[in-house]
Image: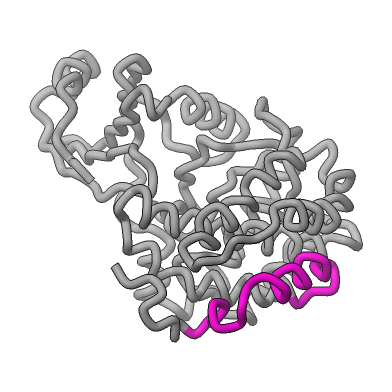
Amino acid sequence: MEMTFPDAAPPFLADAGWAGAAIEPIPGDASARRYFRLRRENGTAMLMHAPPPGEDPEPFLRAARWLDANGLRAPQILAEDTGAGLVLLQDFGEVRMREYLDAWPQDEREVYAHAVDALIQLHQLPPGPFTQYSLAEYQREARLFIDWFCPVQGLYVDLKSWTEAWEEVLGPLLARQRPGVTVLRDYHAENIMLDGGLDRQGLLDFQDALVGHPAYDLVSLLQDARRDVDPVTERAMLEHYITQSGAGPHFAEDYARLGAQRNAKIIGIFVRLWQRDGKPRYLDYIPRVWALLERDLAHPALAPVARWFDAHVPAALRDPTGRLGGTFAV
């Protein structure tokens, strides 16, 4: 990604009191947003550039302020120029949950317990000022699988049967997600910062927040596309959430429903990032996501969607071990 410093940034930073700071580009995420760490003698800050018209910092700002006002650790907003797509943020440091666990895997259970506890805290709040996670949105996301993965594999599938299978699977959980909780939608080990101890976790990448089902972010955390979570840890954290939150009797099956929906969506997104956006590194994650999807499809609640996959996607293209040969050769 182009990491040239935005032309509008120097006067913006001067007005914010950060003129002359050393500038360090930070590798970005799957979006068009760019990040720069600013360093000076008395501290650091992060500059986010969300360039219009493709990006809009307003949803990020709205969600960050709501989270901070309700006791969750989003970065504080130090300055903003939404017209230029510039936001100066509190710096949570350089230690993400992902890299910490790479170095200290023995702490996995403790680190994940704190992340689950943060979700429990979030879910005790009334839902934030965000749009409802509707069936139409779930369907739009799930369709990314057949819009991107299927064509690149030479599979031309029936949209009607796909939509009907997902409606049968997701329909029952819609009533159970009312009145809903704030869903951050990308809550995983690369978006959780550990800047002051394992229990001081900072949140990133929540600009797409919606009001939806409490299982969604738990799935995002425990069925992580970017790192392997020990299945024993996943089961323990699911049980921890259910026990501590008082979740209802259908929570575990809704966790599987949303796990399958999310993992199908992610496979489609990762293929899109390769084909449309020229980011082939995301293909390396697909075998892990396939394995998670297959686990979710084995749950009885997923039977209609599992039958669709059995009928439309050959076993050779569902190999979770990564033995896909040249399927994604680039």
Q: Is 82 placed above or below 37 here?
A: above
Residue 25 screen position, x and y as percent? 18, 44
- Rendered location of residue 89, percent (x, y): 34, 32
Establish if 104 lies above or below 16. below
**Relative to residue 285, is residue 255 drawn left or right?**
right
Q: Is residue 56 visible?
A: yes
Q: Residue 3's image quarter?
A: top left
Colour scheme of this structure image? one colour
Does the magenta stretch mainly form a helix, a strand or a loop? Answer: helix
In magenta, the rendered stretch is 298-321
**Residue visible at 76% across and 33% down in the picture:** 126
Which residue shows up at 27% across the image and 39% down it? Answer: 35
Along the line of sight, the residue nearer the viewer: 258 or 20: 258
Please tell me which residue is depicted at 85% across the width and 56% down the height of the picture: 168
Question: Can residue 311 be found in the magenta stretch?
Answer: yes
Rendered image quadrant of residue 56 = top left
**Left or right of 220, for residue 80:** left
For the image, the number of numbered tags is 0
The residue at 22%/37% (across/down) is 43
Place of residue 173 in the rendered image (x, y in percent of width and height, measured from the top left): 84, 51
| Relative image position of residue 260 (x, y in whole percent) | 68, 63
Q: Is residue 176 left or right of residue 114?
A: right
State the quadrant of the C terminus: bottom left
| Residue 267 visible in this rendered orientation of the protein | no
**For residue 128, what is the image quadrant?**
top right
Q: Nearer the viewer, residue 5 or 189?
A: 5
Say above or below: 268 vs 6: below
Q: Is residue 162 magenta?
A: no
